[in-house]
Protein backbone atom coordinates (compact mmCIF):
# COMPACT_ATOMS: atom_id res chain seq x y z
CA UNK A 1 0.00 0.00 0.00
CA UNK A 2 1.30 3.45 -0.88
CA UNK A 3 1.71 6.30 1.58
CA UNK A 4 -0.83 8.38 -0.35
CA UNK A 5 -3.45 5.63 -0.04
CA UNK A 6 -2.90 5.42 3.73
CA UNK A 7 -3.13 9.22 4.10
CA UNK A 8 -6.36 9.26 2.07
CA UNK A 9 -7.87 6.57 4.32
CA UNK A 10 -6.86 8.45 7.47
CA UNK A 11 -8.35 11.72 6.15
CA UNK A 12 -11.56 9.89 5.20
CA UNK A 13 -11.80 8.36 8.70
CA UNK A 14 -11.30 11.78 10.29
CA UNK A 15 -14.14 13.18 8.14
CA UNK A 16 -16.43 10.33 9.19
CA UNK A 17 -15.45 10.87 12.82
CA UNK A 18 -16.46 14.56 12.64
CA UNK A 19 -19.89 13.55 11.35
CA UNK A 20 -20.29 10.80 13.97
CA UNK A 21 -19.13 13.17 16.73
CA UNK A 22 -21.76 15.72 15.68
CA UNK A 23 -24.43 12.99 15.85
CA UNK A 24 -23.09 11.97 19.26
CA UNK A 25 -23.40 15.50 20.69
CA UNK A 26 -26.83 16.06 19.14
CA UNK A 27 -28.17 12.76 20.48
CA UNK A 28 -27.01 13.36 24.06
CA UNK A 29 -28.39 16.93 24.07
CA UNK A 30 -31.76 15.78 22.73
CA UNK A 31 -31.76 12.90 25.16
CA UNK A 32 -31.33 15.28 28.12
CA UNK A 33 -34.03 17.60 26.77
CA UNK A 34 -36.60 14.85 26.19
CA UNK A 35 -35.89 13.13 29.46
CA UNK A 36 -36.38 16.48 31.20
CA UNK A 37 -39.80 16.72 29.51
CA UNK A 38 -40.60 13.19 30.63
CA UNK A 39 -39.66 14.02 34.22
CA UNK A 40 -41.68 17.26 34.18
CA UNK A 41 -44.85 15.62 32.79
CA UNK A 42 -44.64 12.63 35.10
CA UNK A 43 -45.88 14.69 38.05
CA UNK A 44 -49.12 15.59 36.29
CA UNK A 45 -49.53 12.07 34.98
CA UNK A 46 -49.38 10.62 38.49
CA UNK A 47 -51.79 13.24 39.80
CA UNK A 48 -54.24 12.56 36.98
CA UNK A 49 -54.09 8.83 37.72
CA UNK A 50 -54.80 9.55 41.40
CA UNK A 51 -57.88 11.58 40.45
CA UNK A 52 -59.14 8.88 38.09
CA UNK A 53 -58.70 6.13 40.66
CA UNK A 54 -60.70 8.24 43.12
CA UNK A 55 -63.51 8.74 40.59
CA UNK A 56 -63.51 5.07 39.65
CA UNK A 57 -64.03 4.24 43.30
CA UNK A 58 -66.97 6.68 43.54
CA UNK A 59 -68.57 5.86 40.18
CA UNK A 60 -71.33 3.27 40.26
CA UNK A 61 -71.88 2.80 36.53
CA UNK A 62 -70.46 0.21 34.13
CA UNK A 63 -68.16 2.58 32.31
CA UNK A 64 -65.02 1.00 33.74
CA UNK A 65 -66.08 -2.61 33.51
CA UNK A 66 -63.25 -4.61 31.93
CA UNK A 67 -63.98 -6.69 28.84
CA UNK A 68 -63.14 -10.31 28.47
CA UNK A 69 -60.06 -10.20 26.25
CA UNK A 70 -60.39 -12.30 23.11
CA UNK A 71 -58.44 -10.28 20.57
CA UNK A 72 -55.92 -7.45 20.68
CA UNK A 73 -54.13 -4.69 18.80
CA UNK A 74 -50.34 -4.39 19.03
CA UNK A 75 -48.44 -1.11 18.59
CA UNK A 76 -44.76 -1.61 17.70
CA UNK A 77 -42.52 1.41 18.26
CA UNK A 78 -39.30 1.23 16.21
CA UNK A 79 -37.08 3.96 14.72
CA UNK A 80 -36.91 5.93 11.48
CA UNK A 81 -33.16 6.59 11.65
CA UNK A 82 -30.06 4.44 12.01
CA UNK A 83 -26.95 4.39 14.21
CA UNK A 84 -28.82 2.73 17.08
CA UNK A 85 -27.03 -0.62 17.17
CA UNK A 86 -29.30 -3.59 17.91
CA UNK A 87 -32.03 -1.30 19.27
CA UNK A 88 -34.65 -2.48 16.76
CA UNK A 89 -33.45 -6.08 16.52
CA UNK A 90 -33.96 -6.93 20.18
CA UNK A 91 -37.40 -5.28 20.18
CA UNK A 92 -38.49 -7.05 16.99
CA UNK A 93 -37.23 -10.35 18.43
CA UNK A 94 -39.36 -9.75 21.54
CA UNK A 95 -42.40 -8.95 19.39
CA UNK A 96 -41.84 -12.04 17.23
CA UNK A 97 -41.76 -14.24 20.33
CA UNK A 98 -44.92 -12.51 21.56
CA UNK A 99 -46.74 -13.12 18.27
CA UNK A 100 -45.70 -16.80 18.05
CA UNK A 101 -47.66 -17.82 21.13
CA UNK A 102 -50.29 -15.15 21.65
CA UNK A 103 -52.94 -15.86 24.25
CA UNK A 104 -55.28 -13.72 22.13
CA UNK A 105 -55.97 -13.23 18.44
CA UNK A 106 -54.04 -10.32 16.92
CA UNK A 107 -56.52 -8.20 14.97
CA UNK A 108 -54.14 -5.44 13.91
CA UNK A 109 -50.46 -4.48 14.25
CA UNK A 110 -49.64 -0.76 14.16
CA UNK A 111 -45.96 -0.27 13.21
CA UNK A 112 -44.42 3.09 14.05
CA UNK A 113 -41.07 3.68 12.36
CA UNK A 114 -39.44 2.73 9.06
CA UNK A 115 -37.11 0.11 10.58
CA UNK A 116 -39.97 -1.93 12.01
CA UNK A 117 -41.96 -1.62 8.76
CA UNK A 118 -39.03 -3.18 6.85
CA UNK A 119 -39.06 -6.23 9.12
CA UNK A 120 -42.84 -6.80 8.96
CA UNK A 121 -43.48 -5.67 5.37
CA UNK A 122 -44.97 -9.04 4.37
CA UNK A 123 -47.18 -9.33 7.44
CA UNK A 124 -50.94 -8.99 7.02
CA UNK A 125 -53.24 -6.72 9.03
CA UNK A 126 -50.55 -4.08 9.55
CA UNK A 127 -50.80 -0.30 9.61
CA UNK A 128 -47.55 1.66 9.18
CA UNK A 129 -46.64 5.18 10.32
CA UNK A 130 -43.23 6.59 9.32
CA UNK A 131 -41.59 9.87 10.22
CA UNK A 132 -42.84 9.87 13.81
CA UNK A 133 -39.38 9.49 15.37
CA UNK A 134 -37.22 11.82 13.30
CA UNK A 135 -35.14 14.67 14.62
CA UNK A 136 -38.03 15.26 17.03
CA UNK A 137 -41.27 13.48 17.83
CA UNK A 138 -44.09 14.28 15.42
CA UNK A 139 -46.88 14.73 17.96
CA UNK A 140 -49.41 15.30 15.18
CA UNK A 141 -48.93 11.75 13.89
CA UNK A 142 -48.79 10.45 17.46
CA UNK A 143 -52.18 12.03 18.14
CA UNK A 144 -53.53 10.53 14.90
CA UNK A 145 -52.41 7.06 16.05
CA UNK A 146 -53.96 7.66 19.46
CA UNK A 147 -57.41 8.66 18.16
CA UNK A 148 -57.44 5.79 15.64
CA UNK A 149 -56.65 3.21 18.33
CA UNK A 150 -59.16 4.62 20.84
CA UNK A 151 -61.89 4.85 18.20
CA UNK A 152 -61.45 1.23 17.14
CA UNK A 153 -61.33 0.10 20.77
CA UNK A 154 -64.56 1.95 21.60
CA UNK A 155 -66.16 0.40 18.49
CA UNK A 156 -65.31 -3.06 19.86
CA UNK A 157 -62.83 -4.10 17.14
CA UNK A 158 -60.50 -5.50 19.81
CA UNK A 159 -60.57 -5.94 23.56
CA UNK A 160 -57.05 -4.80 24.49
CA UNK A 161 -54.19 -2.70 23.11
CA UNK A 162 -50.54 -3.53 23.84
CA UNK A 163 -47.48 -1.40 23.08
CA UNK A 164 -44.00 -2.80 22.37
CA UNK A 165 -41.26 -0.29 23.16
CA UNK A 166 -37.73 0.06 24.47
CA UNK A 167 -37.63 1.68 27.88
CA UNK A 168 -34.56 3.44 29.30
CA UNK A 169 -32.89 1.87 32.33
CA UNK A 170 -30.61 4.04 34.44
CA UNK A 171 -27.58 2.57 36.15
CA UNK A 172 -26.82 5.59 38.29
CA UNK A 173 -29.70 7.92 39.03
CA UNK A 174 -30.01 10.75 41.50
CA UNK A 175 -33.17 12.34 42.77
CA UNK A 176 -33.54 16.07 43.05
CA UNK A 177 -33.28 17.15 46.65
CA UNK A 178 -34.34 20.55 47.94
CA UNK A 179 -32.45 22.38 50.60
CA UNK A 180 -34.18 23.42 53.82
CA UNK A 181 -34.06 27.09 52.79
CA UNK A 182 -35.80 26.37 49.45
CA UNK A 183 -38.56 24.40 51.22
CA UNK A 184 -39.20 27.22 53.71
CA UNK A 185 -39.26 29.78 50.91
CA UNK A 186 -41.85 27.78 48.96
CA UNK A 187 -44.03 27.23 52.05
CA UNK A 188 -44.02 30.97 52.73
CA UNK A 189 -45.44 31.80 49.28
CA UNK A 190 -49.18 32.40 49.42
CA UNK A 191 -51.30 30.98 46.62
CA UNK A 192 -49.18 27.87 45.91
CA UNK A 193 -50.41 25.67 48.72
CA UNK A 194 -52.12 23.18 46.43
CA UNK A 195 -49.09 23.04 44.13
CA UNK A 196 -46.76 22.35 47.05
CA UNK A 197 -49.06 19.62 48.38
CA UNK A 198 -49.22 18.20 44.88
CA UNK A 199 -45.43 18.17 44.51
CA UNK A 200 -44.97 16.42 47.82
CA UNK A 201 -47.66 13.86 46.94
CA UNK A 202 -46.19 13.04 43.49
CA UNK A 203 -42.48 12.24 43.51
CA UNK A 204 -40.49 12.99 40.37
CA UNK A 205 -38.76 10.48 38.16
CA UNK A 206 -35.08 9.91 38.92
CA UNK A 207 -33.00 12.34 36.86
CA UNK A 208 -29.72 10.92 35.59
CA UNK A 209 -26.74 13.14 36.31
CA UNK A 210 -23.81 12.63 33.97
CA UNK A 211 -24.96 9.15 32.96
CA UNK A 212 -26.68 7.68 29.91
CA UNK A 213 -29.35 5.01 30.09
CA UNK A 214 -29.29 1.60 28.55
CA UNK A 215 -32.58 0.19 27.25
CA UNK A 216 -34.74 -2.88 27.61
CA UNK A 217 -37.59 -4.13 25.37
CA UNK A 218 -40.99 -4.35 27.02
CA UNK A 219 -44.58 -5.04 25.99
CA UNK A 220 -47.07 -3.13 28.17
CA UNK A 221 -50.83 -2.92 28.15
CA UNK A 222 -52.10 0.45 26.97
CA UNK A 223 -55.89 -0.05 26.87
CA UNK A 224 -57.66 -0.74 29.17
CA UNK A 225 -55.46 1.26 31.55
CA UNK A 226 -54.27 -0.31 34.78
CA UNK A 227 -56.48 1.75 37.09
CA UNK A 228 -57.88 0.52 40.40
CA UNK A 229 -60.42 2.36 42.50
CA UNK A 230 -58.97 3.90 45.64
CA UNK A 231 -60.29 6.44 48.12
CA UNK A 232 -58.37 9.02 50.12
CA UNK A 233 -60.03 11.24 52.73
CA UNK A 234 -57.39 13.94 52.17
CA UNK A 235 -58.40 14.42 48.54
CA UNK A 236 -60.95 17.18 48.02
CA UNK A 237 -62.54 17.35 44.54
CA UNK A 238 -65.55 19.18 43.22
CA UNK A 239 -66.92 18.37 39.74
CA UNK A 240 -70.00 19.84 38.11
CA UNK A 241 -71.61 18.36 35.04
CA UNK A 242 -72.44 14.97 33.59
CA UNK A 243 -70.57 12.32 35.55
CA UNK A 244 -69.86 9.94 32.66
CA UNK A 245 -68.82 12.80 30.34
CA UNK A 246 -66.30 14.03 32.92
CA UNK A 247 -65.01 10.52 33.43
CA UNK A 248 -64.65 9.93 29.69
CA UNK A 249 -62.76 13.21 29.19
CA UNK A 250 -60.45 12.49 32.10
CA UNK A 251 -59.90 8.95 30.83
CA UNK A 252 -59.10 10.25 27.33
CA UNK A 253 -56.71 12.80 28.81
CA UNK A 254 -55.09 10.11 30.95
CA UNK A 255 -54.62 7.78 27.97
CA UNK A 256 -53.10 10.57 25.91
CA UNK A 257 -50.73 11.41 28.77
CA UNK A 258 -49.86 7.72 28.96
CA UNK A 259 -49.19 7.58 25.21
CA UNK A 260 -47.00 10.69 25.42
CA UNK A 261 -45.07 9.11 28.26
CA UNK A 262 -44.58 5.90 26.27
CA UNK A 263 -43.41 7.83 23.18
CA UNK A 264 -41.05 9.98 25.29
CA UNK A 265 -39.57 6.92 26.99
CA UNK A 266 -39.06 5.14 23.68
CA UNK A 267 -37.50 8.19 22.00
CA UNK A 268 -35.25 8.79 25.01
CA UNK A 269 -34.09 5.16 24.78
CA UNK A 270 -33.46 5.63 21.03
CA UNK A 271 -31.34 8.74 21.65
CA UNK A 272 -29.36 7.00 24.37
CA UNK A 273 -28.81 4.02 22.05
CA UNK A 274 -27.59 6.37 19.31
CA UNK A 275 -25.23 8.06 21.77
CA UNK A 276 -23.79 4.69 22.85
CA UNK A 277 -23.45 3.45 19.25
CA UNK A 278 -21.79 6.62 17.93
CA UNK A 279 -19.36 6.52 20.85
CA UNK A 280 -18.46 2.93 19.94
CA UNK A 281 -17.99 3.96 16.29
CA UNK A 282 -15.65 6.80 17.28
CA UNK A 283 -13.59 4.40 19.39
CA UNK A 284 -13.37 2.00 16.46
CA UNK A 285 -12.32 4.88 14.16
CA UNK A 286 -9.59 5.96 16.61
CA UNK A 287 -8.33 2.38 16.76
CA UNK A 288 -8.28 2.09 12.96
CA UNK A 289 -6.52 5.45 12.59
CA UNK A 290 -3.91 4.31 15.10
CA UNK A 291 -3.30 1.13 13.09
CA UNK A 292 -3.05 3.06 9.82
CA UNK A 293 -0.67 5.60 11.38
CA UNK A 294 1.55 2.75 12.57
CA UNK A 295 1.55 1.25 9.06
CA UNK A 296 2.29 4.66 7.54
CA UNK A 297 5.23 5.27 9.88
CA UNK A 298 6.51 1.76 9.25
CA UNK A 299 6.25 2.19 5.47
CA UNK A 300 7.91 5.60 5.63
CA UNK A 301 10.78 4.24 7.72
CA UNK A 302 11.23 1.35 5.30
CA UNK A 303 11.41 3.83 2.43
CA UNK A 304 14.03 5.91 4.27
CA UNK A 305 16.03 2.77 5.06
CA UNK A 306 15.91 1.70 1.42
CA UNK A 307 17.13 5.10 0.26
CA UNK A 308 20.00 4.99 2.77
CA UNK A 309 20.90 1.48 1.61
CA UNK A 310 20.89 2.67 -2.02
CA UNK A 311 23.25 5.52 -1.15
CA UNK A 312 25.55 3.17 0.74
CA UNK A 313 25.54 0.71 -2.16
CA UNK A 314 26.31 3.47 -4.65
CA UNK A 315 29.18 4.77 -2.53
CA UNK A 316 30.56 1.23 -2.04
CA UNK A 317 30.28 0.52 -5.76
CA UNK A 318 32.16 3.71 -6.62
CA UNK A 319 34.95 2.84 -4.18
CA UNK A 320 35.17 -0.70 -5.50
CA UNK A 321 35.25 0.51 -9.09
CA UNK A 322 37.96 3.04 -8.33
CA UNK A 323 40.07 0.44 -6.56
CA UNK A 324 39.51 -1.99 -9.39
CA UNK A 325 40.51 0.61 -11.98
CA UNK A 326 43.66 1.34 -10.02
CA UNK A 327 44.45 -2.35 -9.85
CA UNK A 328 43.60 -3.15 -13.44
CA UNK A 329 45.08 -0.05 -15.14
CA UNK A 330 48.26 -0.71 -17.16
CA UNK A 331 51.21 1.68 -17.27
CA UNK A 332 53.82 2.31 -19.92
CA UNK A 333 57.43 3.25 -19.14
CA UNK A 334 59.16 5.48 -21.67
CA UNK A 335 62.92 5.86 -21.25
CA UNK A 336 65.74 7.53 -23.12
CA UNK A 337 67.64 5.59 -25.76
CA UNK A 338 70.79 6.41 -23.88
CA UNK A 339 69.73 4.47 -20.73
CA UNK A 340 71.47 1.19 -20.15
CA UNK A 341 69.65 -1.99 -19.34
CA UNK A 342 70.86 -1.80 -15.76
CA UNK A 343 69.32 1.69 -15.41
CA UNK A 344 66.01 0.50 -16.87
CA UNK A 345 65.93 -2.52 -14.51
CA UNK A 346 66.60 -0.24 -11.54
CA UNK A 347 63.70 2.03 -12.53
CA UNK A 348 61.36 -0.95 -12.96
CA UNK A 349 62.43 -2.40 -9.63
CA UNK A 350 61.74 0.83 -7.72
CA UNK A 351 58.48 1.73 -9.48
CA UNK A 352 57.09 -1.79 -9.83
CA UNK A 353 55.74 -1.76 -6.27
CA UNK A 354 53.26 0.94 -7.23
CA UNK A 355 52.75 0.62 -10.95
CA UNK A 356 52.03 -2.36 -13.12
CA UNK A 357 54.03 -1.81 -16.29
CA UNK A 358 52.73 -3.40 -19.40
CA UNK A 359 55.57 -2.41 -21.67
CA UNK A 360 58.78 -0.36 -21.86
CA UNK A 361 59.48 1.96 -24.81
CA UNK A 362 62.74 3.70 -25.65
CA UNK A 363 62.45 7.17 -27.19
CA UNK A 364 64.70 9.95 -28.33
CA UNK A 365 64.56 12.01 -25.12
CA UNK A 366 66.56 12.71 -22.00
CA UNK A 367 65.07 11.07 -18.90
CA UNK A 368 61.97 8.89 -18.42
CA UNK A 369 58.23 9.10 -17.87
CA UNK A 370 55.30 6.92 -16.78
CA UNK A 371 52.08 6.95 -18.88
CA UNK A 372 48.54 5.60 -18.43
CA UNK A 373 45.10 6.39 -19.79
CA UNK A 374 44.35 8.86 -16.97
CA UNK A 375 47.60 10.56 -15.99
CA UNK A 376 51.34 10.91 -16.72
CA UNK A 377 54.47 11.31 -14.58
CA UNK A 378 56.96 13.21 -16.78
CA UNK A 379 60.55 13.17 -15.47
CA UNK A 380 62.33 14.17 -18.69
CA UNK A 381 64.76 17.05 -19.09
CA UNK A 382 62.52 18.70 -21.67
CA UNK A 383 59.59 18.78 -19.26
CA UNK A 384 61.76 20.20 -16.49
CA UNK A 385 63.09 23.03 -18.74
CA UNK A 386 59.57 23.85 -19.93
CA UNK A 387 58.28 24.23 -16.38
CA UNK A 388 61.30 26.31 -15.46
CA UNK A 389 60.88 28.70 -18.36
CA UNK A 390 57.16 29.18 -17.56
CA UNK A 391 58.02 30.15 -14.02
CA UNK A 392 60.46 32.94 -15.13
CA UNK A 393 59.34 36.57 -15.73
CA UNK A 394 58.35 37.30 -19.31
CA UNK A 395 58.01 33.61 -19.91
CA UNK A 396 56.06 34.27 -23.09
CA UNK A 397 59.27 35.53 -24.70
CA UNK A 398 61.05 32.19 -24.15
CA UNK A 399 58.36 29.86 -25.29
Image (tube, rainbow, N blue to C red):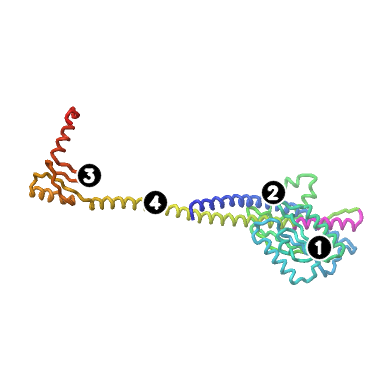
Q: Quadrant of the C terminus?
A: top left
Mark 2 element type? helix
Q: Does the magenta portion include 210?
A: no
Q: Position of residue 83 (x, y in %)?
A: 65, 56
Q: Which residue is mark 3?
A: 375
- Residue 230 place in picture, x, y as percent: 82, 62
Q: Is residue 385 visible?
A: yes
Residue 251 colored in magenta in the image: yes
Give the left or right position of residue 154, taking residue 353 as reference: right
Q: Residues within 10 Å of mark 4 (few under 14, many from 20)?
A: few
Element type where label 1 sits in the image: strand
Q: Earlier in the sequence, mark 2 or mark 1?
A: 2
Where does label 1 land, which residue? 223
Query: Which one is earlier in the sequence, the residue at label 4 or at label 1?
Result: 1
Percent position (x, y) of residue 346? Answer: 10, 49
Classed neighbour count for the residue bearing mark 2: other residues with Cα under 10 Å, few (<14), some (14–19), many (≥20): few
Q: Note whether 25 is above or below 224 in the view shown.
A: above
Mark number displayed over residue 307: 4
Q: CA distance from mark 4 to mark 2?
A: 76 Å
Whether residues under marks 2 and 3 lie with C-beta atoms below 8 angstroms apart, the answer is no
* 375 is higher (above) or lower (below) than 164: above
Q: Nearer the viewer, residue 148 or 247?
A: 148
Where, by quadrant of the figure, is residue 250 drawn?
bottom right
Disc 4 versus disc 1: nearer the observer: 4
Along the line of sight, which residue is nearer the eye, 121 or 48? 121
Question: In whole angstroms, how far apart are the C-alphas of marks 3 and 1?
Answer: 113 Å
Residues drawn in magenta: 241-262
Whole-Å distance between the Cαs marked 4 and 3? Answer: 35 Å
Question: CB atoms at circles 2 and 1 under 8 Å apart?
Answer: no
Q: Which mark is residue 180?
A: 2
Residue 377, quarter of picture: top left
Amino acid sequence: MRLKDIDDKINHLYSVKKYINAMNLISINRYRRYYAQLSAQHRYFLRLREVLEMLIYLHRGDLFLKRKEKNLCLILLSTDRGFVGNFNEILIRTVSDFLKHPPLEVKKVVIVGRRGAQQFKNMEKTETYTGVFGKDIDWGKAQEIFYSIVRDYMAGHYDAVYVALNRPIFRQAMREEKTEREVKKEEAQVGEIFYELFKRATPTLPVAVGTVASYKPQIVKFIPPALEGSYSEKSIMNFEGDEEFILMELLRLYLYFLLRQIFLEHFSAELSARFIKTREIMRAIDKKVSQLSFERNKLRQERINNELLDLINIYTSMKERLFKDMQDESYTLEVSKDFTEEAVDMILRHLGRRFHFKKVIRRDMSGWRVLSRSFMYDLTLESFLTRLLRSLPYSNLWV
